[in-house]
Image (cartoon, rainbow, N blue to C red):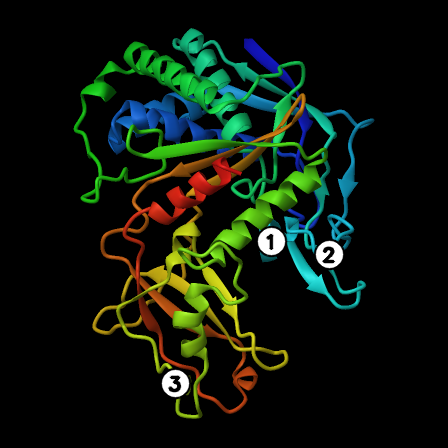
């Protein structure tokens, strides 16, 4: 049985759990699942988004329901290095740190009982914790071709993604010990092209018929149907930062993201009310007892667009007026039920933007990767839905769902990449 081992150091807080969601636990199945995403992202480009071909090749690497995977993942913690931040404690002491903007409500909550501080809802492994991950490949016919693919899939995970929750917002960062790479845009582009060639050879050697299958092709909007490294399906930039610690560089990332989303196009200053809030949400929430809009600008039109939806869904906003419990709105998407206009699903759309801080000898290289896949299925609907308990509306009737146009393209995110690259 051939094996490959890496000594790993955690570089940004890693949130991964088992049955107990509040307790930190490194789990091999979760590592395999993350590798599967990055395998699809690269192999999807090789087979030109042909889903049937991708399924065949994925089965050779990760197995299928009636056939086990040809490789195992083993994890061994270096107990003398492990640092865990427990559930219920602050991630960092500075409650104004924009690291909490990145963490979101999924990883932390605001506690008035704990010195009005954000506290963790899950435990995590802190940076400088170390572990070893080992890949063991069984003696299968394609074993010699499989190991290079596993190696490069893990490289993609390390340099573009991460492990655990909120990896798209900078958490779960890891690096391979004693393997220091000078990260630049040119270097990463070269490596992506090299890895494509390795995946191409794997497909040719193990399942040449997959490359001859029917090609599903891109969507009508000329976007890949899923996140992948197709020529027209991704872009990335690298920002250089001199911050000394992980919390400071993550706080910078959070501040850049927050300020960009809250700044009106053409303006250089941060606004307390985002364009989406002023144009849509505020007018949607401010209603009378019959559900009619009482805002001076009137109810938003039915063909409204909320620009920041392109950063991912659901999109949640709370009213800035009044005292808790406050009224709110949530942007969701789904299918319409048969015979009426009610959206019956409440589905996420993961952010197409990955933020990955990578520790370098002098500071950090922050990689911002954008996957420009089709944002929503062709027949999906987006609506802004009122949230909060009935009593939080204080006698005002909740407004009906407001249709919202899905994003037409990724120009806003391209603008964000251009901004952070030039910082």
The residue shown at (31%, 26%) is 45
Density class for disc 3 (Cα within 10 Å; few <14, some 14-19, many ≥20) is some
Density class for disc 2 (Cα within 10 Å; few <14, some 14-19, many ≥20) is some
Sooner in the amino-acid sequence: mark 1 or mark 2: 2
Q: Which mark is residue 150?
A: none
Circles 1 and 2: CB distance less than 8 Å?
no
Query: Can you identify the residue that label 2 sits on?
Result: 95
What is the quadrant of the N terminus in the image? top right
Helix, strand, or loop for circle 2? loop
Sooner in the amino-acid sequence: mark 2 or mark 3: 2
- Measure how far apart labels 3 and 1 are at the Cα level: 30 Å
Compared across the picture, whether 107 is left or right of 288 comes to right
Density class for disc 1 (Cα within 10 Å; few <14, some 14-19, many ≥20) is some
The residue shown at (83%, 26%) is 80
Return the x and y of residue 361 as percentages of the image width and height.
Answer: 67, 21
The residue shown at (18%, 20%) is 212
Return the x and y of residue 193 as percentages of the image width and height.
Answer: 37, 18
In this view, the residue in front, 198 or 262, is 262
Vertically, is 55 above or below 280? above
Return the x and y of residue 368 as percentages of the image width and height.
Answer: 48, 36
Return the x and y of residue 336 as percentages of the image width and height.
Answer: 27, 66
Q: Is residue 46 visible?
A: yes
Vertically, is 314 above or below 216? below
Sooner in the amino-acid sequence: mark 3 or mark 1: 1
Query: Can you identify the residue that label 3 sits on?
Result: 293
Query: Can you identify the residue that label 1 sits on?
Result: 101
- Measure how far apart labels 2 and 3 are at the Cα level: 35 Å
Quarter where residue 116 is shown: bottom right
């Amino acid at each position: 049985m051939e094996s490959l081992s890496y000594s790993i150091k955690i570089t940004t807080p890693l949130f991964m759990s088992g049955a107990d969601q509040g307790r930190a636990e490194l789990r091999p199945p979760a590592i395999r699942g993350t590798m599967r995403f990055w395998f699809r992202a690269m192999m999807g480009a090789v087979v030109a988004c042909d889903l049937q071909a991708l399924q065949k090749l994925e089965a050779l690497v990760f197995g299928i329901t009636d056939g086990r995977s040809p490789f195992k993942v083993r994890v061994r913690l270096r107990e003398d290095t492990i640092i865990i931040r427990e559930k219920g404690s602050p991630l960092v002491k500075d409650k104004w740190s924009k690291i909490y903007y990145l963490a979101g409500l999924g990883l932390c909550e605001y506690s008035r009982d704990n010195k009005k501080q954000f506290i963790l809802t899950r435990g995590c492994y802190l940076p400088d914790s170390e572990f070893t991950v080992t890949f063991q490949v069984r003696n299968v016919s394609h074993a010699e071709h499989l190991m290079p693919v596993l190696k490069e899939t893990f490289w993609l995970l390390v340099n573009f993604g991460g492990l655990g929750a909120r990896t798209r917002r900078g958490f779960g960062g890891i690096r391979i010990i004693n393997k220091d790479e000078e990260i630049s845009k040119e270097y990463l582009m070269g490596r992506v092209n090299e890895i494509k060639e390795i995946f191409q050879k794997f497909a040719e050697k193990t399942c040449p018929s997959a490359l001859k299958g029917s090609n599903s092709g891109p969507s009508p909007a000329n976007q890949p149907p899923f996140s992948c490294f197709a020529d027209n399906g991704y872009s990335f930039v690298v920002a250089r930062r001199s911050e000394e610690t992980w919390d400071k560089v993550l706080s910078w990332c959070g501040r850049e993201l927050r300020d960009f989303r809250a700044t009106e196009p053409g303006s250089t200053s941060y606004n307390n009310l985002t364009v989406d809030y002023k144009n849509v949400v505020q007018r949607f929430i401010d209603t009378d007892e019959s559900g009619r809009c009482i805002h001076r600008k009137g109810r938003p039109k039915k063909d409204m667009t909320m620009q920041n939806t392109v950063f991912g869904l659901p999109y949640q906003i709370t009213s800035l007026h009044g005292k808790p419990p406050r009224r709110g709105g949530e942007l969701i998407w789904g299918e319409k039920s048969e015979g009426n206009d009610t959206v019956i699903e409440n589905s996420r759309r993961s952010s197409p933007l990955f933020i990955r801080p990578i520790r370098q000898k002098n500071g950090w290289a922050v990689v911002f990767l954008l996957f420009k896949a089709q944002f929503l299925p062709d027949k999906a609907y987006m609506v802004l839905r009122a949230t909060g308990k009935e009593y939080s509306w204080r006698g005002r009737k909740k407004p009906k769902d407001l249709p919202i146009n899905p994003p037409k393209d990724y120009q806003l995110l391209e603008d964000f990449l251009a901004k952070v690259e030039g910082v």
